[in-house]
Amino acid sequence: MIEVLPIFTNSPLRNFSYLVYSNRTGEAYCIDPFDAKSILTHTRNLGVKIKGILNTHEHGDHTQGNLELKEETKAIVYGHKDAKDKIPGLDKVLKEGDIVFSFEEESLVVWDTPGHTFSHLSFVRKNPKTILGIFSGDTLFNVGVGNCFRGGDPNVMYETISSRFETLPDSCLLYPGHDYWENNLKFAEHVDPKNEFRENFKSKVKPFQVSEIGEEKKLNPFFRRNTNSVKERLVSLNETISDDRSVFLTLRRLRDHW
Ligand SMILES: [Fe+2]
């Protein structure tokens, strides 16, 4: 089995790095290294060795640990081909469908998921039967989606969310690049006021809770754009909405100014 350890850094950016590893082989991959020292402490405690560093995208808060970690572990640095000149220490590029790592029945597979930037990858953890989890970088967050004003495009984000993330099974675990639970729940209250599931869920949410896609479908206003709760609220805010895409784009714009 592939194990996953989320590593949170308590900075204002609230970044998550992840260690994906096998206890049997001691082989590990680090996704989006933020604080190299803390990641190395965790690998020592677990008794694993980092073979590869995987960057979801080129933004500094997802790559800042690359060089120190590479220096210490001699790991290979991977990223999107269009981020070649922007990812420190990049050795190998990845594309849609590449298998980064496999162990027993499980593997980590690359999805090309543009929107937050045009060189954004997500890493999907799967077995032959189903998708078990997704490392979504700054594409999908708990109760929200990533912004698009640092090299992305909200129209492209809409395509990625609706054609890729919405196809994930309900049981798939979400491993995002940041912990934005608190703010996103507040924004959801603003744009999706009549969501009983959220009101019940809120009292049970623990810090850094890992959610399932099935929960996101009931919590996340960007997934709930077809509900009366969201659509009626946007109309009451004097927003003009027409099709599915327009609801998504309106939500993204309102979240930018939240
Ligand atoms: Fe980013």
Image (cartoon, rainbow, N blue to C red):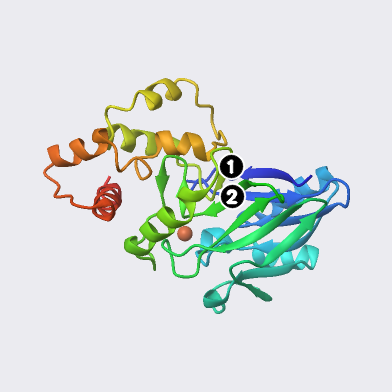
Is the residue indicated by label 1 positioned so its CB lies within 8 Å of ligand 1?
A: no
Q: Is residue 135 above or below residue 215?
A: below
Residue that badge 2 annotates: 134
Residue located at (79% from left, 44% from top): 1
Neighbour tally class for label 2: few under 14, some 14-19, many 20 plus, Cα within 10 Å? many
Image coordinates for residue 2, horizontal then vertical, percent: 76, 47
Report how far apart the C-alphas of labels 2 and 1 lie in the structure: 7 Å
Image coordinates for residue 81, horizontal then vertical, percent: 57, 76
Q: Amino acid at mark 2?
A: Ile
Query: Which is more N-terminal, label 1 or label 2?
Result: 2
Q: Is residue 7 above or below residue 33?
A: above
Contact, mark 2 vs mark 1 (Cβ under 8 Å): yes
Residue located at (25% from left, 48% from top): 254
Neighbour tally class for label 1: few under 14, some 14-19, many 20 plus, Cα within 10 Å? many
Q: Secondary structure at mark 2?
A: strand
Query: Can residue 149 be seen?
Result: no
Task: Tell which of 209 and 36 is nearer to you.
Answer: 209
Q: Secondary structure at mark 1?
A: loop
Residue located at (49% from left, 50% from top): 167
Image coordinates for residue 143, horizontal then vertical, percent: 42, 40
Residue that badge 1 annotates: 172
Q: Is residue 193 above or below residue 56?
A: above
Residue occupying the far right of the picture: 24
Q: Is residue 100 left or right of residue 139?
A: right
Q: Amino acid at mark 1?
A: Cys
Q: Nearer the viewer, mark 2 or mark 1?
A: 1
